[in-house]
Image (cartoon, rainbow, N blue to C red):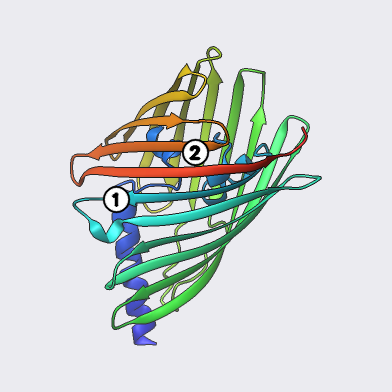
Amino acid sequence: MKKIILLAGIVHAFSALYAQNSLPFSGARANGLANSTACLTDEWALFNNPAGLAKTRDLTAAFTQTLHPRLNAFNATAVAATIPLKTGTAAAGFYHTGDDLYSEQIAAAGYANTFGLASLGASLHVIQYRAEGFGQTHKVTLSLGGITQLTPKLAVGAHILNVNQPKLADNGERIPTVMTAGLAYIFSDDVWATTEIQKDLDYHTTWRGAVEYKAHQKVSFRTGFSLNPGAAYLGIGLKPGKLGIDYAVSYIPETGTRHQASVRYSFKTASK
């Protein structure tokens, strides 16, 4: 029992460092957009706002790798796949971060569908926490989200990660719940912008803003910022045919630069 409580304390300490340093959500597109995920609709919505899966109507496989030169323990790898169904879209994926001292692994499954102007989604995450000398523990979390297209140009999105907030140990330590709400606006065929606020129940509110500019049919540039913690983000996306490649770099004064690259391939486009 003492080991489980100590493991819960280690998980909490690492979670605090994650929150304070705004470590990456999955997907380099999101990373280039300051991790603004409330209104994003891509395969990585499985790990962010699951409602974003609803309009991902391609059979897609994706891989992403994150490198943190100053904090190698926070290097991360994830894979995801989306499967369009007659009604809605299903997704599955796996995420890993950590080293021999401490690590987290997540197996995820999600589903989303569109009802009129609104897309609703849910995802289940089976999380394994492991710390050297303290063993490991498994927890299941539920995340919910929604995206509403208010007008052809304006969308609003919100999601809650870890709604059920499962206990890590009998001392009351829980996996934190994170709430996010945001807006996205299409200024033109080439310019898309988003802003959001995020609140971890244990930490201060984070504000993010980002812009994506389509310089060419196959090339997009992204930039963004976050406050609390303060960070700057840049990204680029390439889409030659069915293949998509995204890269992002971010800078946080306390921890330095972080790099992320993602690759995805669309095998089949579903009828729309």
Q: Which residue occupies 37% across, 39% down?
A: 206
- What number is the disc on residue 248? none
Q: Which residue is mark 1?
A: 67
Counting residues from the start of the chain, the first of labels 1 and 2 encountered is 2
Which residue is rendered at x = 35% and y = 44% of the image?
A: 260
In the image, residue 196 lies at what x, y percent?
46, 32
The residue singled out by tag 2 in the image is 37
Label 1 close to label 2 by CB (< 8 Å)? no
Identified by mark 1, the residue type is: Leu
Left or right, 224 with reference to 157? left
Quadrant assignment for the N terminus: bottom left
Amino acid on which the number 2 mark rests in the picture: Thr
Q: Residue at x 50, y 55 (%)?
A: 79
Image height check: is 178 above or below 238? below
Q: How far across and how far down the image is residue 81, in percent?
A: 59, 52
User: Where's residue 228, x and y in %?
Assistant: 30, 39
Q: On the image, which quarter does residue 152 sit in?
A: top right
Q: Is residue 7 visible?
A: yes
| In the image, farthest residue toward the front | 241
Mark 2 surroundings: few (<14), some (14-19) or many (≥20) residues within 10 A: many
Which residue lies at the image location 32% right of the left edge and 71% below the top edge? 9
Depth check: give the residue in front, 88 or 6.
Answer: 88
Mark 1 Cα within 10 Å, few/some/many (few <14, many 20+)?
some
Residue lying farthest to the top in this orientation: 188
- Residue 211 position (above or below residue 253): above
Judge whether residue 164 can be spotted in this image. no
From the viewer's perspective, tell me whether residue 120 is left or right of residue 210.
right
* Residue 84: % across, % down: 72, 46
What distance separates the C-alpha of mark 1 from that of mark 2? 20 Å
Q: Is residue 78 above or below residue 86?
A: below
Placement of 154 over or under 240, stated as above or below? above
Q: Quadrant of residue 27?
A: top left
